[in-house]
Amino acid sequence: MGTETLNGLASDRILEKPAIHCKARFEKPPEYPARFAVPDPMVPWTADFPGYSPPYYVSPVVIANDSTQKPGGWADPEDISRIADVPVESFSGRLLHDEKGRPLNPVGRTGLSGRGLLGKWGPNYAADPIITRINMATNSIELLAIRRKDNGQWAIPGGMVDKGEEVTRTLARELEEETGVKLDMVKGRLTYRGYVDDPRNTDHAWMETTAKHLHLPAETARRVNPEAGDDAAAVRWLPLSRQSMEGLYASHCSLVRKALAGMVADNPFQVSEEELQIARALISIG
């Protein structure tokens, strides 16, 4: 992807792929059928699992947004043979494909085939702006977080990258749409680019993200007035603690930890030693 677009995936990226996924096997949106049980040793595609028979599911909302049938639709057609450019690589590297030509989840089996709620076969690219500030009154670091409408969990504001859109533009757009906050994400520090252990993931469709961190100085933070957008049930400055971080949606706890670790390691935002000490205390959480 270079640093900004979804082309040239092999260049300038932070490559990370978990050894195993958990949320993609043990959690699911309410409309999904029960996942086929996949023990840890059977997750890799290289593991022989002769009894593996996951249910197939594609949400009606995905079918209804087939881009070949609906103008402005955001989903691939159900018939993968109608796609001219089936993905052969992602942030996770070269992809495997099954006998039907469907991309296989790079981390392994999830207990569910099809696309679920995800529109694209293979990687579905998102962007996550991680915005933090220091609250000296409480001696804590706070995360600009939204409460998701689908499950009530607090999360990093973010969303899907439109085709051809620069990731920095996606980060700023999603931040404004979900929180009402306008920030220049060009100044954000690249924190993570890769696979996301997400409850929506399936064997054939999964989330990958680009996360950038921006820590606001006190004066800038005071001018920020968050207001929940249409896609968020609520927005707030969430004090970061073991409990609040572990309760974040999907892999967001890990993303926040990576952001804090990068801030401590390089101090790119030139924060005080006191702020760095607070961040160090949070890095081990997750």
Image (spheres, helix red, strand yellow):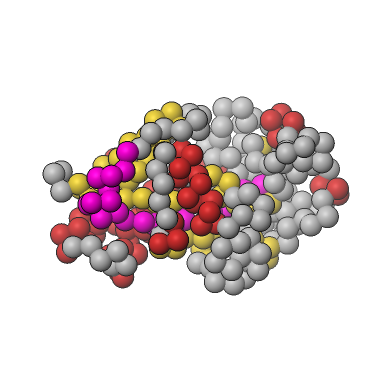
Of residues 55 and 282, which is closer to you in this image?
282
Return the x and y of residue 204 as percentages of the image width and height. Answer: 69, 48
Quadrant for the N terminus in the image: bottom right
Q: Tell me the quarter of the picture where residue 222 sits.
A: top left
> Does the magenta run of residues contain 277?
no
Judge whether 269 appears above or below 71 on screen: below
Return the x and y of residue 140 as percentages of the image width and height. Answer: 20, 48
- At 83% from the left and 55% from the top, the residue drawn is 84
Q: Residue furthest right?
A: 81
Q: Is residue 85 visible?
A: yes
Return the x and y of residue 77 as percentages of the image width and height. Answer: 79, 42
> Does the magenta run of residues contain 222?
yes
Residue 133 relative to residue 58: left or right = left
Of residues 168 and 11, which is closer to you in this image?
168
| Range shown magenta | 204-225
- At 58% from the left and 46% from the top, the residue drawn is 160
Residue 27 relative to residue 139: left or right = right
Of residues 14 and 246, which is closer to you in this image?
14
Judge whether 42 appears above or below 267 on screen: above
Q: Tell me the quarter of the picture where residue 268 sits.
A: bottom left
Residue 284 relative to residue 6: left or right = left
Return the x and y of residue 256 as percentages of the image width and height. Answer: 37, 52
Q: Tell me the quarter of the picture where residue 65 sits.
A: top right
Residue 63 relative to residue 190: left or right = right
- At 35% from the left and 43% from the top, the residue drawn is 144
- At 66% from the left and 37% from the top, the residue drawn is 116
Q: Is residue 40 visible?
A: no
Of residues 44 and 101, which is closer to you in this image?
101
Count of picture labels: 0
